[in-house]
Image (cartoon, grey):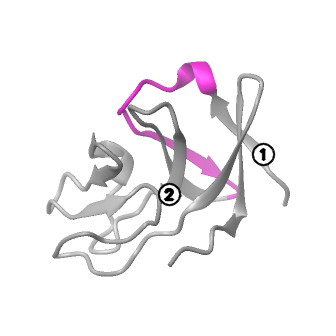
Amino acid sequence: MSAARACALSELVQDQPLKVVLDDVPICVVLDSAGDVHAIGDTCTHGEVSLSEGFVEDDTVECWAHGSRFSLRTGAALNLPAYEPVPVYVVQIDGDDVLIDPAVTKAVA
Protein backbone atom coordinates (compact mmCIF):
# COMPACT_ATOMS: atom_id res chain seq x y z
CA MET A 1 0.00 0.00 0.00
CA SER A 2 1.24 3.49 -0.70
CA ALA A 3 0.68 6.55 1.47
CA ALA A 4 -3.00 7.11 2.17
CA ARG A 5 -4.88 10.13 3.46
CA ALA A 6 -4.99 9.85 7.24
CA CYS A 7 -6.74 13.15 7.97
CA ALA A 8 -6.77 16.81 7.03
CA LEU A 9 -3.99 18.96 8.43
CA SER A 10 -6.70 21.46 9.42
CA GLU A 11 -8.36 18.73 11.58
CA LEU A 12 -5.33 18.49 13.84
CA VAL A 13 -5.31 20.50 17.04
CA GLN A 14 -1.90 21.30 18.50
CA ASP A 15 -0.84 18.81 21.19
CA GLN A 16 -4.08 16.80 20.92
CA PRO A 17 -3.55 13.27 19.59
CA LEU A 18 -5.85 11.95 16.87
CA LYS A 19 -6.40 8.24 16.27
CA VAL A 20 -6.64 7.10 12.67
CA VAL A 21 -6.83 3.56 11.30
CA LEU A 22 -5.21 2.83 7.94
CA ASP A 23 -5.30 -0.68 6.52
CA ASP A 24 -6.31 -1.99 9.99
CA VAL A 25 -3.26 -0.29 11.59
CA PRO A 26 -4.13 2.10 14.47
CA ILE A 27 -1.95 5.23 14.31
CA CYS A 28 -1.63 8.17 16.70
CA VAL A 29 -1.20 11.45 14.77
CA VAL A 30 0.05 14.55 16.59
CA LEU A 31 0.65 18.16 15.59
CA ASP A 32 3.29 19.33 18.05
CA SER A 33 3.92 22.83 19.34
CA ALA A 34 6.67 23.34 16.73
CA GLY A 35 4.17 22.68 13.94
CA ASP A 36 5.55 19.23 13.05
CA VAL A 37 3.19 16.33 12.37
CA HIS A 38 4.13 12.95 13.85
CA ALA A 39 2.63 9.48 13.40
CA ILE A 40 3.38 6.63 15.80
CA GLY A 41 1.76 3.32 16.62
CA ASP A 42 -1.36 4.00 18.66
CA THR A 43 -1.10 1.03 21.02
CA CYS A 44 1.01 1.33 24.17
CA THR A 45 3.56 -1.48 24.31
CA HIS A 46 2.85 -2.02 28.02
CA GLY A 47 -0.85 -2.74 27.56
CA GLU A 48 -3.62 -2.57 25.00
CA VAL A 49 -4.21 1.14 25.60
CA SER A 50 -4.71 3.78 22.89
CA LEU A 51 -1.98 6.42 23.02
CA SER A 52 -4.27 8.86 21.21
CA GLU A 53 -6.26 9.04 24.46
CA GLY A 54 -3.11 10.21 26.25
CA PHE A 55 -1.38 13.51 26.81
CA VAL A 56 1.13 15.33 24.60
CA GLU A 57 3.98 17.28 26.13
CA ASP A 58 6.86 18.64 24.06
CA ASP A 59 7.78 15.79 21.70
CA THR A 60 6.24 12.95 23.73
CA VAL A 61 2.88 11.31 24.22
CA GLU A 62 2.01 9.83 27.61
CA CYS A 63 -0.17 6.76 28.04
CA TRP A 64 -3.09 7.75 30.26
CA ALA A 65 -3.32 4.31 31.90
CA HIS A 66 0.14 3.77 33.39
CA GLY A 67 2.12 6.93 32.62
CA SER A 68 4.66 5.59 30.12
CA ARG A 69 5.88 8.29 27.73
CA PHE A 70 6.89 7.68 24.12
CA SER A 71 9.00 9.86 21.85
CA LEU A 72 7.02 11.19 18.89
CA ARG A 73 10.25 11.29 16.87
CA THR A 74 11.74 7.86 17.64
CA GLY A 75 8.91 5.85 19.20
CA ALA A 76 11.20 5.01 22.15
CA ALA A 77 9.62 4.23 25.50
CA LEU A 78 11.09 6.88 27.80
CA ASN A 79 10.03 5.46 31.16
CA LEU A 80 8.61 2.34 32.77
CA PRO A 81 6.42 0.36 32.84
CA ALA A 82 6.76 0.32 29.01
CA TYR A 83 10.18 -0.54 27.65
CA GLU A 84 9.45 -1.55 24.04
CA PRO A 85 9.20 1.21 21.41
CA VAL A 86 6.18 1.88 19.21
CA PRO A 87 6.56 2.14 15.43
CA VAL A 88 7.08 5.55 13.82
CA TYR A 89 5.55 6.24 10.40
CA VAL A 90 6.66 8.59 7.65
CA VAL A 91 4.32 11.58 7.32
CA GLN A 92 3.84 13.50 4.08
CA ILE A 93 1.85 16.71 3.79
CA ASP A 94 0.12 17.39 0.47
CA GLY A 95 -1.85 20.62 0.67
CA ASP A 96 -4.27 19.98 3.55
CA ASP A 97 -3.88 16.19 3.41
CA VAL A 98 -1.80 14.26 5.93
CA LEU A 99 -0.55 11.14 4.15
CA ILE A 100 0.82 8.05 5.93
CA ASP A 101 1.82 4.62 4.63
CA PRO A 102 1.02 2.16 7.45
CA ALA A 103 3.29 -0.46 5.84
CA VAL A 104 6.41 1.73 6.06
CA THR A 105 8.05 2.65 9.34
CA LYS A 106 11.00 4.93 9.90
CA ALA A 107 14.33 3.42 10.77
CA VAL A 108 15.19 5.07 14.06
CA ALA A 109 18.14 4.58 16.34
Q: Residue at x 43, y 66 (%)?
A: 75
Residue contact between numbered discs 1 and 2, judged by CB atoms under 8 Å: no
For the magenta stretch, what is the residue range? 9-23
Mark before the other along the chain sequence, 1 or 2: 1
- Which residue extends farthest right? 2
Describe residue 76's horizontal placement relative to residue 57 as left or right.
right
Relative to 63, residue 46 above or below: below
Q: Residue at x 54, y 56 (%)?
A: 26
In this rendering, the label closer to the viewer, 1 or 2: 2
Q: Residue 102, how many percent across, how many down?
A: 68, 60
Q: Residue 23, how many percent across, how many down?
A: 71, 57
The residue under label 1 is 4
Q: Residue at x 21, y 64 (%)?
A: 68
Instruction: Give the secondary structure at mark 2.
Output: strand
Q: What quarter of the picture does the N terminus occupy?
A: bottom right
The residue under label 2 is 40
Relative to 79, residue 41 above or below: above
Q: Residue 48, how many percent across, how many down?
A: 33, 67
Instruction: Give the secondary structure at mark 1.
Output: strand
